[in-house]
Each structure stands twice: as structure tokens, then as C-alpha cells.
Image: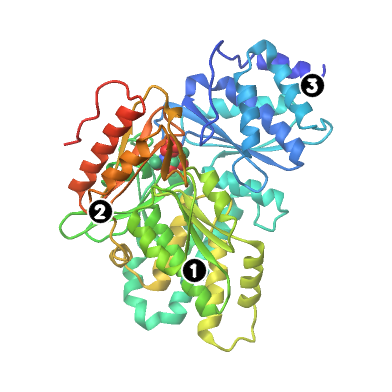
Amino acid sequence: MTQFEKVFRNSALHPKPVGLVLQYGTAGFRTNAKELDHIMFRMGLLAVLRSKKTKATIGVMVTASHNPEEDNGVKLVDPMGEMVTPSWEEYSMQLANAEQDVLLTALKDVIEKEAISMDQDANIFIGKDTRPSSEKLSQAVSDGVMSLGGHVHDYGVVTTPQLHFMVRCQNTQGCYGSPTMEGYYRKLSQAFVQLTKHVRQSTFHQWVHRLTSSKHLLVDGANGVGALRLRDMERFLQNQLQISLFNDCREGKLNFQCGADYVKVQQKPPQGVEMSVGERCCSFDGDADRIVYYYKDSDGCFHLQDGDKIATLIGTFLKDMLTQAGLDLQVAVVQTAYANGSSTRYLEDVLKVSWCTTGVKHLHHAAQEFDIGVYFEANGHGTVLFSNAAVHKIEKLAQDSSIKNEKKRTAAQLLHSTINVINQAVGDAISDMLLVEGVLAVQGLSVQQWDAIYSDLPNRQRKIKVADRRVITTTDAERRVVTPPGLQEAVDMLVKKYPQSRAFVRPSGTEDIIRVYAEADTQENTDALAQEVCLAVYRLAGGVGEEPKPLH
Ligand SMILES: CC(=O)N[C@H]1[C@@H](OP(=O)(O)O)O[C@H](CO)[C@@H](O)[C@@H]1O
Ligand SMILES: [Mg+2]
């Protein structure tokens, strides 16, 4: 039987419902798990082609992140552990949406367009989250891979960033780390222990009290894979961090009233976490590629430390360490329009701030432009990228035993440990958590002191339904509207009415809606501005249904 006959025969075991059309969105295919069996099989096929084309190992992750438990999804991971290149998103849609009888034609079309040599070997790493549907769906991916002659390494239940890490390790011949679970835990935890050891050596007397009290962290695992894998990692951390894990999959439903998305959107603590006043807490999302921090003050007020606060903490730390080490490397923080205006104002005074459109793949790409690029979405998805030249300079300095200046030597070693604690392939809740914990410990900062670096401006996000969201087009990293005519002028007029205000409008890339964002000096003004902008969108961009009403 030829390879294509095998694909044809096996694809019948994963039939596509006639007429079903799905999009490869910002985060891959994502919908109710019942609609995904054929998509999984076909993504297995596409992963084989991508592997043959790049002559490298490719990853396939089965997850729907923060979506409800009944959903699922799939995304492909490119050789360096990054999201698959956009031109292949097109191919994935061609394959996913081809009716059964033309699947082989669609497959051969990709092979021809990309001039793929079918003699080349193909290696695919597969991972999945804890959803009940993930087991069967990841099996469908394997079936697709093997039907086209590819080799599968199934990592089982892993976080999304762990799979990205494995792919990057495998394709860099071990330079980045070892492509095993133990390799992941060892690399990150050793770097974390190194980071925090410096605290003990350099500032022991000053911080000993704070350290003993600040080693404790409450983690909300969203009842997802992050909780399971964090448990596995604990024994590698040598008691440098004491974790109390909640929503750890023992009871509770995945992402239900818990997890990073719930905490960020609701601006309140997750269910199931027992927080005391001033205790540091964080929440992962369902596949552990996002993290937010928070605490409760003595008045019982909830304080959220989102992606902007994390980026600020890390960006300013790196900048300080580079100055102390005497290294001339540029640190930039990449933000989207959703970054709180206070964070931008604060950061612009200390380092370079760059803007890009919503979506991690855009941020990742933009951050690659700098020696050190810190990127975070406000919702907690982000990481830090170091250019090869920056890694080389830092490593050289950290290993230079002739440096007599202790401050300089320590700064170089801290920077070196920082590089290793970070998962540069993709935003990673576990790695970001260790980084934040390390930076707080090194700087001797409590969660309240970190929070006080700047105060967030009150902000509001709203959603508006319109007949066709494509009528709104934007420019300047989505901060200004181009069409429909008159809308930007209307927003400009409204913004002038309120102090310290800002507002923008953009079509969502993941939902069939327009998003409105507003911020101003008070929550009352913010809500009034958001309401007026919603009305302008409704009137000028073809709103459907009832006119938007004030929230309160
Ligand atoms: C305002 C907001 O949170 N937007 C989210 C959301 O994108 P939209 O294009 O706004 O729907 O989903 C993306 C994928 O998960 C995420 O990267 C992004 O931050
Ligand atoms: Mg996620």
C-alpha cells in the first residue's frame, strides 16, 4: 500500500463532518471537543509535512487552555519552540476544511507548493492537557502522523510550554537543555536555586528575616496540568520555595471559577484558595502558559498583579543588573494596546517600550528585535528573549574569574541564572513564577512593595456585536481606527472629555465581536468613556441587537 493510500484509508476512521469549517485562530484550532477528531488527524499529517520541510522535530499540543472543560484544541510548534509560522496556518486550514474526498488533493497541494521531499524523516512530539477528551484526540494526532510515516514521541500530559521546551531542546542538540521532563525540571530549578542562593550570600543579614517569610507562595493550579507538573517539580527546588498548591485537580473542575483568566477578567480571587492578608498568590491558566499574581490587603481589598506588573518587575531588574555588570545591552519591553497606561508611563522613563498587535506570536516576533526583549500581554502571557550575542556576553562575564568588583561579578552571575530560569520558547507559568520569585527575593521586595511600583489606572473592557467585524480596521498597533470613517474622530472627541484617558477599538481575533478598551482617572469616568465609545462603535460600525447600555 502506498503512503497516500494509507492516509486515505485511515482518514476514514476520523471523518470530517460535511460542511464544517474551522479557523486556525490566534491560538490554533479551538472549539467543542466533539468537532475535533478529524482536525487532530489532519494536524498529525501537517506536522509530518512541516517536519520534513524543516528537517526538524515539530510539536503538536492538544489543549484548549482557559476554555471550558468540554472544549479542546490543537496547535503546532515550530523547530525553535515558537508558534508555527503564519504561512502554514493557511495550509492547516486547507487540510482541516477539505471534504473527505479531496483530502489527498489538499495534502498533495501543500507538498507541491512547499517542494517537500517525502523521503525525508519526520519526527513529532505530542503533548496534551488534562481534559477528558485529550486522550482520544491526541491518539488521533498520532494516527495522522503514523499514517504518513512519521515517528511519534508522546510526552503524555504536559503543560503547553513544556512541549515547546522539548521541541527546542531536541532541535538545538541539547544546547538549550535535555528534551526530557527531568531535563526541564532540572534546568529551571537549578537556575532558580542559583538565583536565590545569591540572596543568601550577598545580603544574608539584611534579608534573612524577609526570606524566611517570603519563601511561601500560594498557587492556584486552575485544576489543570500546571498543578500536576508543578507537584513533580517541587522536589527539585531544594526548599528554596514553599508552595501551597490549590485547585490541584483532586476535586473541582478545570478552569471553573479559578485560574489566571478567571482572576484577570473577574478581578477577584479564585475559589478554593485560602488567602491570608499580604500573602503572595498566583494563578496559572488551564495549560500553564499564563500567570497572574495577587494579594489581599488589610482592608480585604484584592490587588491584581497582571502581565504589565510582571513585565515591569522583570524589565527593571534586568536593566539594573546590566548596569551593575557594566554590560551595554538594550532591554526593551514589548506591550500591546491593552497595557495599562501607568505601566507604559513608568517603563518609558527607564527603558525602551515597543508596541505591537495583540497575540503572542506578534509579541514574540517584536521582542526578537532587541538584545533583551521582555514581552507580556496584560493577561499574563509572556516571557523574555535574549539574543545569542546577549547570552554570549553575559556567559563570558559570569565566568570571568578575574573580576574583582563583587557587585559586578554577582550581577553577571544573577543575569546568567536569569537566562536559565526562563523558558525562551514561549510564555510559561512555571518558569515565569520562578523568575518573579527569584527577582523578588534578590531585590528583597514584598508583594506590596512590588505592587507599589506604580498604580494601575482604572480600566474597562467591553464587547460589542456588529454585523461584520471586518468593517473596523486599525493601525499603529491597533491603537487607532482607520475604517469606518468618523469612528476615530469620535473616539478622539470622547477621550478629550476625561483626565488621563485613553480608549481604543479593535476587532477580536478569537471571538466574533469588537473589543472596546477605556481607561481614565477614576472608575466612574472610565465606565462613562467606555459606554460612550461603545455607542460610537454601535452607531458607526453596524451594531446589531440592542444599543449598548451602561454597566451599572
Ligand atoms: C484582550 C485580550 O485579552 N485578548 C486576548 C484574545 O485575543 P483577541 O484577539 O482579543 O480575541 O485571545 C488571544 C489568544 O489567547 C490573546 O493572546 C489575547 O490577549
Ligand atoms: Mg493558555
Mark 1–mark 3 CB contact (< 8 Å): no
Give the residue pinned by disc 3: 3
**Percent x, y of residue 192:** 50, 64
* Residue at mark 1 to residue at mark 2: CA–CA distance: 30 Å
Q: Residue at x 47, y 25 (%)?
A: 31
Amino acid type indicated by mark 3? Gln
**Percent x, y of residue 211:** 36, 71
Q: Quadrant of ligand 1?
A: top left
Give the residue pinned by disc 1: 318
**Percent x, y of residue 53:** 76, 37
Mark 2 falls on what kind of element? Answer: loop
Say which of 182 and 293 sits in front.
293
When asked about the image quadrant of residue 450, the answer is bottom left
* Residue at mark 2 to residue at mark 3: CA–CA distance: 57 Å
- Residue 129 in the figure: left or right of residue 452: right
Dot 1 crowding, Cα within 10 Å, few <14, some 14–19, many 20+: many
N-terminal of the two: label 1 or label 3? 3
